Amino acid sequence: MVVTFKVITLAASIEEKTINLFEDRYYDGGSILVEGSRIKCWKSGGHGSESYLEVVQNSCNLFC
């Protein structure tokens, strides 16, 4: 089982002022390979370019 901690990591980044929720962007291409395990988005092809606020709103792989 792969467990992701996006909200915790995002909260730490906001606290440390290393990202801006509204201006900084992330590209969701549909999946990412982490230490040999593929973490997939439910949406084929992913969500594309999103602000970090949209990343939290569209988070879809809490446990997979």
Image: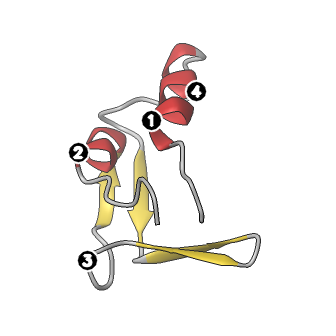
Mark 4 element type: loop
Tell me: residue 52, above or below residue 29.
Answer: above
**Among the two numbered marks 2 and 4 on one chain, the one whose residue lies closer to the N terminus:** 4
- How far is mark 1 from mark 2, CA to CA? 10 Å
Q: Is residue 58 left or right of residue 14?
A: left
Q: CA distance from mark 1 to mark 3?
A: 20 Å
Return the residue at label 2: 57
In the displayed image of the protein, which residue is found farthest to the front?
Answer: 1
Q: Which amino acid does the dot numbered 3 rest on?
A: Lys
* Count of marks overlaid on the render: 4
Residue that numbered label 1 is attached to: 7
**Residue 11 in picture, x, y percent from top left:** 48, 24
Q: Are marks 4 and 3 in contact (CB under 8 Å)?
A: no
Residue shown at 56% from the left, 34% from the top? 9
* Label 2: element kind: helix
Q: Residues within 10 Å of mark 1 (few under 14, many from 20)?
A: few
The disc label shown at residue 18, or none: 4
- Amino acid type of the residue that numbered disc 2 sits on in the rendered structure: Gln
Q: Quadrant of residue 61?
A: bottom left
Mark carried by residue 43 = 3
> Do callouts 3 and 2 mark residues in contact (Cβ within 8 Å)?
no
Please state the horizontal and vertical placement of residue 28, each as a whole percent of the image. Answer: 40, 67
Secondary structure under the numbered disc 1 in the rendered image: helix
- Residue at the image point whose x is 25% and y is 77% from the top: 43
